Amino acid sequence: MNRKITFLSLFLFALVTAFFVASISEAERAESFEDRRSRILGELSLAIDDATLDERYSCCIDPPCTMCYMGSWIWDDGICRCDEMIANGEDDKVCPQCVRGLEEGQCKYANKSICELNREVTS
Ligand SMILES: [Zn+2]
C-alpha cells in the first residue's frame, strides 16, 4: 500500500514538472534582446575602462567612443588616439563618433578649449 502511494506521488510529481517545463516557451527561457544588449554593452564599457586605465585609450569625450575600440576607425588594436589627434591638429584622424560627441558638448575636459577642432597648431 505504502509503496503504491509513493510510486503514485512520484509519478504525479514528474507529470506536473513535465507540464510546467513544457509550458515555458523557448523565447521565455532565452535571454531577452534588451538583456543581451545591455550585457554586451556593459562588457564593452568595462573593456574600454580597462584600456583607458592602461593608457591605451585616450578618448576626448565622456562617455568614451566605442568606435575606436571596435576597430571601426583607423586604429585596429582596440586603442583610441582621438585626444592626441586633436592636440596635433589632425582633425581628419578624429573618429566620427568623437567628432559628433564634441559637437554635442561631450568634451571630457573641464577646459572645453582642449577639445576644439579646426584650431591652429603652432609648431
Ligand atoms: Zn574615438
Image (cartoon, helix red, strand yellow):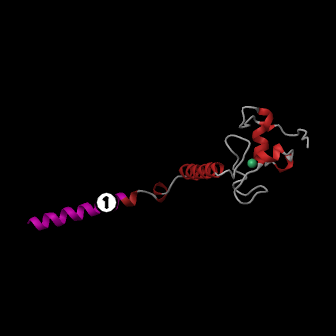
Badge 1 density bin: few <14, some 14–19, many ≥20, Cα 10 Å: few
Q: Quadrant of residue 113?
A: top right
Quarter that holds the C terminus: top right
Of 72 and 19, the residue lying toward us: 72
> What residue is rendered at 82% in x and 44% in y?
86
The answer to whether 120 is drawn above or below residue 13 in the figure is above
- Taking the image as shown, residue 68 lies to the left or right of residue 116, namely left
Magenta part, dominant SS:
helix
Of 28 and 57, the residue lying toward us: 57
In the orientation shown, which residue stands out farthest toward the front?
A: 123
The answer to whether 104 is drawn above or below residue 53 in the figure is above
- Taking the image as shown, residue 25 lies to the left or right of residue 117, namely left
- Circle 1 sits on which residue? 17
- Taking the image as shown, residue 80 lies to the left or right of residue 88, namely left
How many marks the image carries: the answer is 1
The question of residue 14 being in magenta is answered with yes
The question of residue 115 being in magenta is answered with no
The answer to whether 13 is drawn above or below residue 95 in the figure is below
Q: Which residues are magenta?
A: 1-20
> What residue is rendered at 61% in x and 53% in y?
47
In the orientation shown, which residue stands out farthest toward the left?
A: 1
> What residue is rendered at 34% in x and 60% in y?
19
The answer to whether 117 is drawn above or below residue 71 in the figure is above
- Residue 101 on image: x %, y %: 75, 40
- Taking the image as shown, residue 77 lies to the left or right of residue 28, namely right
